Amino acid sequence: MEEVPVTIKNPAAQPKAKEILYQPSYDSLGSRILLTVSNFDKFHPILDPNKKDVAAITEQDIQTDRKKYNLKILNEVSDDERRKKNGVASEHLTTAVTEWASDASERFNRIKPLKKQIQNFLGLDEASDFTTEQVITYYKKYFDVVNQGTKYEVFADDIIERYASSGNFDFEAYNRDIDGIRLFSRKFFGEEGDEIIQKYITHWINFKGDPKKYVTEANKEINTVQDIHKPHLEKLFKKAQEIQTTKKDNLELESIPENIKQELKDVPFGEIKAIEKSRNLMITKRSQIRELVEPLLVFAAERFWDLNIRTLSTSANAKDIGHTGYIIIDYNSLSDENKKIAEEHGELIPNYDGFPVIKFSLPITPETSTQSIQKQSDLFADKFKKQKAHWIPSYTLAEISKKYNAYHNEPELTPEFLIEQGLYYDKEGDKFYLSEEHFQKVVDESEVDEVPAGTFKTVSTNSTDQFAKIEQPTSKPTQLETTPLAEKPKIVKINSLKEILGILDKGQPDEIQNISITEAGLLDLLPKAILDSVKSKNPAAKKFNPQITDDIKKTNFAIDQSGNSGKGTVKGKIGAEGKFLLMPINIGIDIEFKNSDDNKDIVPSGISVQPDNFQSLVADNLRKYKIKEELRLYLQKQIKGRRVLKNLDLSINSKDKTLDVTIQ
């Protein structure tokens, strides 16, 4: 089957379930494999199916640090199966894989968050739907036997990251995908290799989800070897003996690289592109880090997230050559112990956008290697201790209603409406959080001893501010920088209501200068009604938009034409004045008509809106739908297939009072 050429990126973690929905079975094969790969030197004989006195497993026996795992036995046994069976898969199996991928592509296209994450992983255009071939490419990454060998450790880590969180595992989501995973494993490695590795993965997930229950249940079965499992254990035991008797150099345990999710080579800095995202955004999900942070600093940013430390800004890309890359963390989010660590290894800047931060600088010269920058940032992050996440905001319904209605006109907000916007509602505490992961950090903080000082605080409902003022550090401030940290981005990316709330946490609405609407979470800022109301005096333009409404008071259309009467290009602009939601509004639409003998292309090339009160227009229309896709589909319908609109992007500039729409 031909593989679709794509640029492989790393997968982001999927939304997590709060409760375990399914409990997999325990058996001797999976239990013995898991114990062996975590304690190879000491316990490899337990793979012997004739051994009936295996000692009980303890939680200490199952190393939670996967960097110490030895997966050589599993990999080499799978290699044996692959050499025997790869390339001779039955026609029925090939058909089954294709049919499964077809069903999976439909499911991915229906589940928009999952679709977006996998598209980012494969480097695909978000506006496009998945094809069967792309889904096959997505899973085939784990079974690329030509270039990468059998990297089951990558596969297992990905399964854990995608479906497990805070000791819980979403078995419902896992089981939806696992049928396809088994098909691919069987196709590329043979049925026995699939059976062995699947047992390992299942037991690892089981242990990860509930280690205490796992060791109790697994110990009941560890010495009961079923006949169906004996051939697998014999094969694994034989391979373990071969590895055990090789030279010492070959006995080194295979370790998973510290940054396995990145798998970065030491490429020139000139090939590291900048991620043009705004600083200071409130991250609400771990998976967002890969969207906001450049690859070299992803591990450090994820480490800070896991430690409940708030990262504000990062940079390490081609634009930093000859300058300085950096990681900036929120000083007020740190515990007392972490503040001391930060001040020792970083620079305290008392006034960064109005509050204190710690900056860790990464000088970058033309000779600097990407690996050295990555290592420096990793070492910096590893110095910190886990702490309580006191910087995470929470809201009562009254608080969030007040905040929301400062920019919207929504008479009565309900929990159901806010949940639709992506917020997480804690019924027991009667509080809203920007995400379930934020909530999980708060409820898990009882396990952390450190208590930070000088942190963000949620205020009572009768306060006029949403958050208390940020406390200044007690330590002596260092000298401020004489040059800016970095040029502030011109556009603040907004994806949803929760991100708006996150941004507003740090200041007043008038501090937001530039906004770009990028995806789900917002209603039509420029709804169909506006486009439908455009009236044109030009016959060709009427084909683009023939509908007229009473809202439009006057229209105009100007044409510049070149070329012969039968061929050429017609460029024009439709202008309209009217009211939208009882507000005065001006609309300008640039349209290009490409006329030829066999077809007539009508291409909307730009749209701008200039209301008298731009901020109110933005505020009154923030809702739950995808503006970009809505506009793209609407415009695509208008031109009736004469041209495919590949991409549509909206950027709002409150200074110029324009909503710019760029169409490709």
Image (cartoon, rainbow, N blue to C red):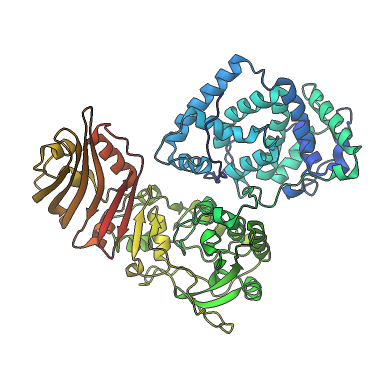
Q: Is residue 256 left or right of residue 485?
A: right
574 or 61: which is nearer to us?
574
| Whether residue 409 can be seen here | no
Quarter of the picture containing the N terminus is top right
Tell me where residue 4 appears, x and y as whole percent: 52, 31
| Image quarter of the C terminus | top left
Look at the image and tell me whether residue 217 can be seen.
yes
Relative to 168, 125 lies left or right: left
Question: Measuring 81% from the left and 45% from the top, which residue is drawn there?
Answer: 253
Total marks in image: 0
Q: Name the image quarter holding residue 567.
A: top left
Percent of width and height locating residue 633: 30, 38
Q: In the figure, 601 relative to 433: above or below?
A: above
Q: Is residue 104 left or right of residue 516?
A: right
- Residue plotted at (44% across, 73% down): 353
The percent coordinates of residue 6 (x first, y second) are: 52, 37
Q: Residue furthest top?
A: 91
Q: Is residue 37 above or below residue 479?
A: above
Say left or right for 82 vs 225. Answer: left
x then y, percent, for residue 346: 62, 73
Residue at the farthest bottom position: 476
Q: What residue is drawn where x is 14% and y is 37%? A: 540
- In front: 406, or 463? 406
Quarter of the image where one finds residue 637: top left
